[in-house]
Image (tube, rainbow, N blue to C red):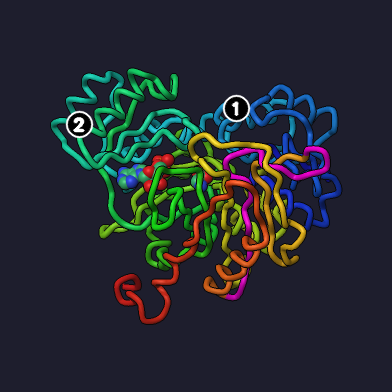
Amino acid sequence: MKVLVVGGGGREHALVWKLRQSPRVNKIFCAPGNAGIARLASCVEVKAEDIGGLLSFARREKIDLTIVGPEAPLVAGIVDAFERAGLAVFGPSAEAAAIEGSKVRAKELMARYNIPTADFAVFDRPGEAKEYVLKRGAPVVVKADGLAAGKGVKVCATTDGALAAITEIMEKKIFGRAGERVVIEECLAGEEVSILAFADGETVLPMPAAQDHKQVYDNDQGPNTGGMGAYAPAPVCTPRVAEEALQKILIPLVKGLADEGCPYRGVLYAGLMVTQEGPKVLEFNARFGDPEAQPLLVLLRTDLVDVCEAVLAGRLAAQNICWAEGAAVCVVLASGGYPGSYAKGKVIKGLENVPDDILVFHAGTALVDGQTVTAGGRVLGVTAAAKGIREAIIRAYEGVREISFEGMHYRRDIGQKALKYEKGFLRQGVEN
Ligand code: AMP
Ligand code: GLY
């Protein structure tokens, strides 16, 4: 069959890499792709947001299955458009993807179905939002309602910081219309974990828990990024946390949406804080996380096409999904300056020296005059799997060591949080 992957980051490279292993797939296209994807698939010069362009391409090429990576086209209705045209497409409808596209919508759903999350209030006037912050005090979290490329959340340690965030989002409109409304919420304490699951409108099958590293510097310092690295499985998600997340969060959300006539099909991503009172939702995403997709797809044993088809046909309940034992780690190599401004066009050296069993997924890369150069903030995701997390970390950094480009920055502590759960550390605290 012919498959089209929409997007051009590390997540999409990992999707294409996984699809290449399927005996059922004989042709893969990726729109727009990147320099790494171009070695495995035919890259198509259509932007991920250009739904009309993607639709005519899929029709012309008679694509059998389209898998959508990023949130923007999902929220804009790519799945609805493809379905209307009779094309098989993996991902939620626009209405279902609004769990990511509108934080107000997500909060309202959580309130309606008693899903544990931070206490919150919604404002569409800056004056009232500021009054609330003054009354409530800090720390507090200010979130733009709409999509803001992962930058719309400000965790504010002080009242002044929160007032400034409201001014920027609602008055200076730094995220445009995405900031017309804000959610102001309680600041939760604990360790974060990402639980991704396949959902077919009814059945929810969680993947191994993953952990992202959002801040740009080691020890979670500095501004938030799209994610500087990830690993799975994440031991902070004990069997008890996993069961609670499934029963109190994922199942009630999918069931609630189904009851409202808005079945959720695709990957459902719950970003959780594991608090003293159990897991609470920080955010929902309507897709695979990036970089989380990279270690997860490396661990997935089942054919991805089989899983996608089971989701589309509503037969997940009968689908077995197998995961490798052991762990996988992805270390992101970023351009110096990211998540702020950064240079592009730097030649990437040493890719050929990376051992074969270490995967280098490309994100912001391009091929210029036969050379692979940087073309984005997150450039590469160096990903390795091993028997355990400790070995996987060592292997991933062995790959990192071979690669260089001017200004290259990466975190040196990806996966370290998992190690504290190993024998002798904090054992009783997390397993009860
Ligand atoms: P989001 O895009 O909603 O995941 O938010 C980005 C990051 O902000 C999260 O990964 C958390 O680190 C942080 N965050 C969001 N909401 C809260 C909250 N209520 N309490 C503490 N941290 C939060
Ligand atoms: N890594 C976080 C995300 O994909 O939203």
Q: Residue at x 81, y 28 (%)?
A: 59
Tell me the amino acid under the disc marked 2.
Val
Instruction: Out of 386 and 174, give the one closest to the viewer.
Output: 174
Check disc 2: other Cα within 10 Å, few if <14, some if 14-19, many if 20+: many
Q: Which residue is drawn at 53% across and 40% down?
A: 286
Q: Which residue, given by chain and number where applicable, does mark 1 sit on?
A: 77
Q: Which residue, given by chain and number where applicable, does mark 2 sit on?
A: 133
Q: Is mark 2 on a helix, strand or loop?
A: helix
Q: How many labels does the image show?
A: 2
Residue 191 in the figure: left or right of residue 29: left
Kindly indicate the quadrant of the structure image that contains residue 143.
Answer: top left
In the image, residue 319 lies at what x, y percent? 64, 58
The span picked out in magenta is 368-387
Query: Overall secondary structure of the magenta stretch?
Result: strand
Instruction: Out of 95 and 293, give the one closest to the viewer.
Output: 293
Question: Is residue 81 shown to the viewer in this render?
Answer: yes
The image quadrant where one finds the C terminus is bottom left
Label 1 CB less than 8 angstroms from ligand 2 = no
Instruction: Out of 167 and 337, give the one closest to the viewer.
Output: 337
In the image, residue 68 lies at what x, y percent? 65, 39
